[in-house]
């Protein structure tokens, strides 16, 4: 699948023993961002992430994004920069960022969309453990936003 020397060609993208950077965040969608745009993000990510050896998942519901990304540190750092520069969302809260030698959690997912049934619980747990005041404030804004819209309604606000 990849032509780099020493890089596995396995179609399942399982790289054991490789240093992986993990980036987990949540954010609020900008006005007008809904299912159609999120599907475009997924399609683009699936194409570009394969070449960058990045895997992960994206949850979108009630105008809130939650994303888990893992891959080579250099590639993930580059992706993080573009995530922060993307005008399709705001109130970005970094929930986890680490580099470890471990197996991937999502080895065959260049980027998969996951349904948002439990997003309130995930964000409430993040709020309870958050220490940075900017993250706490953003998480509270996101939870207020979720409280004002039914979870079944997807889209920005």
Image: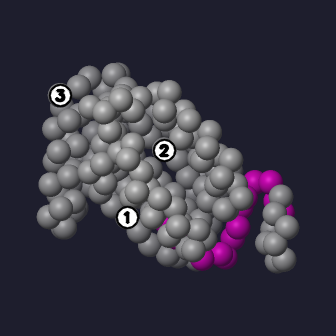
Q: Name the residue under label 2.
A: 58
Disc 1 residue crowd, few under 14, some 14–19, many 20+, Cα 10 Å: few
Tell me: residue 13, above or below residue 33: below
Q: What element carries label 3?
A: loop
- Disc 1/disc 2 C-alpha distance (Å): 15 Å
> Residue 56 got which mark?
none
Q: Is 15 part of what is drawn in magenta?
A: yes
Who is closer to the viewer here, 149 or 116? Answer: 149
Q: Is mark 1 on a helix, strand or loop?
A: strand
The mark nearer the N terminus, 3 or 1, is 1
Q: Is mark 2 on a helix, strand or loop?
A: strand
Q: Mark 1 points at which residue?
A: 96
The mark nearer the N terminus, 1 or 2, is 2
Which corner quadrant of the image does residue 89 belong to?
Answer: top left
Which corner quadrant of the image does residue 136 belong to?
Answer: bottom left
- Quarter of the image with the N terminus in it: bottom right
Q: Magenta part mainly helix, strand or loop?
A: loop
Tell me the magenta residue range. 9-22
């Amino acid at each position: 699948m990849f032509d780099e020397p020493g890089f596995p060609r396995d179609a399942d993208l399982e790289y054991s023993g490789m240093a992986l950077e993990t980036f987990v965040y949540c954010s609020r969608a900008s006005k007008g961002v809904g299912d159609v745009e999120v599907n475009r993000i997924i399609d683009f990510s699936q194409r570009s992430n394969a070449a960058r050896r990045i895997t992960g998942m994206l949850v979108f519901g009630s105008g809130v994004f939650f994303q888990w990304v893992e891959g080579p540190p250099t590639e993930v750092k580059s992706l993080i920069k573009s995530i922060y520069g993307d005008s399709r969302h705001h109130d970005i809260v970094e929930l986890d960022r680490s580099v470890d030698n471990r197996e991937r959690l999502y080895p065959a997912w260049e980027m998969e969309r996951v349904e948002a049934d439990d997003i309130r619980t995930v964000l409430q747990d993040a709020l309870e453990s958050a220490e940075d005041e900017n993250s706490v404030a953003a998480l509270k804004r996101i939870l207020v936003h979720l409280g004002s819209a039914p979870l079944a309604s997807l889209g920005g606000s």
